[in-house]
Amino acid sequence: MSIFQATTSAPVNIACIKYWGKRNEQLILPTNSSLSVTLSQDNLRSTTTARADPSFTADCLWLNGKVDPIKAGGRLHTCITEMKRLRAAFEAANPDQPKIAVFNVHICSFNNFPTAAGLASSASGFAALVYALAKLYALPQTPEELSLIARRGSGSACRSLFGGFVAWDMGSDDATGSDSKARQVAPESHWPEMEALICVVNDAKKGTSSTSGMQRTVVTSALLQHRIGFVVPSRMAEIESAIADKRFGDFAEITMRDSNQFHAVALDTYPPIFYMNDVSRAIIAIITEYNRLSEQPKAAYTYDAGPNAVIYALTPNVREIAQLVLYYFPQAEKVVIGGQEVQAALPEGFNEAVAKRWEVGAVKGLIHTRVGDGPRVLSDSEALLNAQGIPKTLA
Ligand code: DP6
């Protein structure tokens, strides 16, 4: 008897031009286009095994070892249903293919980074799920076409179907959303010197989720209208051109300005939403002072719906930036970059007074990574389900 199974992994992406606001909640159509950098799966990834079998009595999903209910009409349900629909169409067009679209599926997914780190896992998670089902079903769809379905899981997930530098074009088809999809602006090989230092910031309180936060922004913020109408369209064109020409200074300025505006729009929401905290703001002050020392910015901070900082920088400058972060935010464990331990230090001419030196734990971890590739197909030996289709960790 044949086994119908596939295992894939998918990357995290961090936006330089932020997606914030939906014009259609059901279809997940955004109020503006966005652009992100895909981070290497060598450091951060979601891994997913999907299997179809006539013996399964229901669709079932395990996330990080626990059952995640697939609610009718929910986002998971939509993605799985859409993928089954594509398989059914494929079977209709290719009558020699096995009829597996009608089978229930078991899906098992793991993130290799702790949820407690506050790193969004929905983007890599939905991208890995859609990609695993696409491989299980041997579908001919391109990553761009698959991004339409990942988008229905979580908006930002559509950008994790590609490596490198990725745009999500908002599209104009409001009836079906057929043109609201991801597009690769440049592959990772175009600018492999692009690296990222993620500062995992301690977060005591539970923040507002992206989904409900952006809903409230769309309803209450006048500033959002200015952002989507007058700011983002030209910014998208400018950052695409900066990436094409590898102009890091321009890339950095646009990225920092867009993060600032996203958080301004959150503040303009009523009641207001605060995602950054004192540590986040101290990192902004430190990067701003660092950039003052050179003609062009050498580091770009950006923040999503939480206090963690992602600092983009080019390879030659990453060590110096890590030394600087360590000076203000001492770490309990040693930090190694390029095989060498990083020591706390300030660059020549740096005004130390821009921030205070924090206690150990204010930044509870540093993750050094770089631009990376799109979803990968993994071998059967890496499958997360056992022979019976049950997560190996539970069997
Ligand atoms: C701040 O994709 O998590 O990270 O579509 O409601 O699932 P939903 O929202 P989500 O929002 C991400 C918002 C952001 C910016 C970005 O990634 O572009």
Image (tube, rainbow, N blue to C red):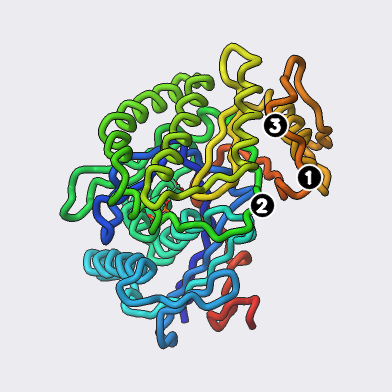
Looking at the image, the residue that sits furthest to the left is: 175
What amino acid is at disc 3? Ala
Residue at the (35%, 54%) spot, across then down: 151
Q: Nearer the viewer, residue 313 or 129?
A: 313
Residue at the (43%, 23%) spot, across then down: 244
Residue at the (22%, 50%) spot, across then down: 178
Looking at the image, the residue that sits furthest to the top is: 295
* Picture layout, residue 22 above or below residue 34: below
- The secondary element bearing badge 1 is classed as loop
What amino acid is at disc 1? Glu
Closer to the observer: label 2 or label 3?
A: 3
Instruction: Determine which residue is flagged by label 2.
Output: 202
How packed is label 3: few (under 14 Cα within 10 Å), some, or many (20 or more)?
A: some
Alpha carbon of mark 2 to alpha carbon of mark 3: how far?
A: 17 Å
- The secondary element bearing badge 3 is classed as loop
Q: Earlier in the sequence, mark 2 or mark 3?
A: 2
Instruction: Determine which residue is flagged by label 1.
Output: 359
Q: Nearer the viewer, residue 264 or 245?
A: 264
Residue at the (48%, 20%) spot, across then down: 250
x, y percentage for residue 12?
53, 49
**Would residue 272 be visible to someone looking at this image?**
yes
Mark 2–mark 1 contact, CB under 8 Å? no
**Would residue 140 be visible to someone looking at this image?**
no
How packed is label 2: few (under 14 Cα within 10 Å), some, or many (20 or more)?
A: some
Residue 71 position by quadrant: bottom left
What amino acid is at disc 2? Asn
Instruction: Determine which residue is flagged by label 3.
Output: 355
Alpha carbon of mark 3 to alpha carbon of mark 1: how far?
A: 13 Å
x, y percentage for residue 275?
51, 48
| Relative horizontal placement of residue 158, taking residue 249 as reference (left or right) | left
